[in-house]
């Protein structure tokens, strides 16, 4: 009776121990179950989960500040409105010239004309108070004042003309023997040379000398070097500075020649305006 009980007890303990052994083992797969994977100390190498890669997004650029809006005077908008309205009424009256449309256009045009008259009147008043803004102070328009201004300018030109030779200036006069305008320039060239005392070299571009022209010589390349393509041509030269300036092509009066020479030798751009 005791023997079966001992056997039963033994089997029970063995089974319990085996169960306990099974429950208490560490949960590692044995080396025989790694299925060809890496193993360490007879146990399968556990895959280590890598932390997720978080891409750092670039920080958004700060919003650009909008440029400050240009502040325009209200008169600019009003001027544009008046122009647009006048044009609009004109177009309406032109396409449909009814009495009402024409009346509306004339009435608005009269308003615009009144504004222009006020502008012109204030323009004069401002010039009277500020004479430096009055263009007629420098270039008068009244007949008597114009005469005085012309005499003053002629005196300046004459004074400048007398000093040209001393400054080193002279003239090249290019001509052709068969050029009618060249022959007509005989008197202006001679008178200019006489008044200014400048030396004149007359150069025949066709090789035929005309004795009535002062100091006449055959062209030896001067015309080509200076770009002379037409006759008569007069050039102002300075033997000291080596400066050469064309002053006339075609027939030109003595007065005009003297005026151009004065502008080129005694004034700066803008002085006469």
Image (spheres, rainbow, N blue to C red):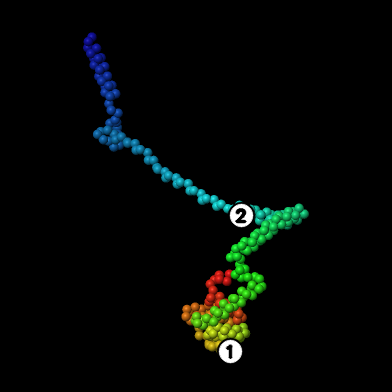
Q: SS of the residue at dot 1?
A: loop
Left or right side of 3 for 70: right
Furthest toward the bottom, the residue is 211
Horizontal and vertical percent position of residue 258: 58, 79
Residue 8 in sight? yes
Q: Nearer the viewer, residue 178 or 152?
A: 152
Residue found at x 52% / y 81%: 163
Among all residues in the image, which is located at the extreme top?
Answer: 1
Residue 99 in the figure: left or right of residue 269: right
Location of the N terminus (image quadrant): top left
Q: Nearer the viewer, mark 2 or mark 1?
A: 2
Q: Please tell me whether residue 113 is drawn above or below residue 168 in the rendered image.
A: above
Q: Nearer the viewer, residue 118 or 235?
A: 118
Residue at horizontal 37%, vertical 40%?
53
Q: Earlier in the sequence, mark 2 or mark 1?
A: 2
Residue at image position (73%, 53%) is: 104
Q: Secondary structure at mark 2?
A: helix
| Quarter location, residue 256 | bottom right
Could you say which is closer to the camera, residue 117 or residue 203? 117
Q: What percent of the width, then of the height, locates residue 105? A: 72, 55
Q: Quadrant of residue 115 in the image?
A: bottom right
Residue 52: x %, y % from top left: 37, 38
Q: Residue at x 47, y 80 (%)?
A: 240
Query: In which quadrant of the rendered view does residue 91 lie?
Result: bottom right
Please give the residue where the numbered disc 1 appears in the rendered image: 212
Q: From what the image shows, is residue 2 above or below residue 143?
A: above
Name the residue tied to disc 2.
Answer: 76
Q: CA distance from mark 2 to mark 1?
A: 66 Å
In what quadrant of the picture does the C terminus appear?
Answer: bottom right
As drawn, 106 above or below 4: below
Q: Of 42 and 246, which appears nearest the observer? A: 246
């Amino acid at each position: 009776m005791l023997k079966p009980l001992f056997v039963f007890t033994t089997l029970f303990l063995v089974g319990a121990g085996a169960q306990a052994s099974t429950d208490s083992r560490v949960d590692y797969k044995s080396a025989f179950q790694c299925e060809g994977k890496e193993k360490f100390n007879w146990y399968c190498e556990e895959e280590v989960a890598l932390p997720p890669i978080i891409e750092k997004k670039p920080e958004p650029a700060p919003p650009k500040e909008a440029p400050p809006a240009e502040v325009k005077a209200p008169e600019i908008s009003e001027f544009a409105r008046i122009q647009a309205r006048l044009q609009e009424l004109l177009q309406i009256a032109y396409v449909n010239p009814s009495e009402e449309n024409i009346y509306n256009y004339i009435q608005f045009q009269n308003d615009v004309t009144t504004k222009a008259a006020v502008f012109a009147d204030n323009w004069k008043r401002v010039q009277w108070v500020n004479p430096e803004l009055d263009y007629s102070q420098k270039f008068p328009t009244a007949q008597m004042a114009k005469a005085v201004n012309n005499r003053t300018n002629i005196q300046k030109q004459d004074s400048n003309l007398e000093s040209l030779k001393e400054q080193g200036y002279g003239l090249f006069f290019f001509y052709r023997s068969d050029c009618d305008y060249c022959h007509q320039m005989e008197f202006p060239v001679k008178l200019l040379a006489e008044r200014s005392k400048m030396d004149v070299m007359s150069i025949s571009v066709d090789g035929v000398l005309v004795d009535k022209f002062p100091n006449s010589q055959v062209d030896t390349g001067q015309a080509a070097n200076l770009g002379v393509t037409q006759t008569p041509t007069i050039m102002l030269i300075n033997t000291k500075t080596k400066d050469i300036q064309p002053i006339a092509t075609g027939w030109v009066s003595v007065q005009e020649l003297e005026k151009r020479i004065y502008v080129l030798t005694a004034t700066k751009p803008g002085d006469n305006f």
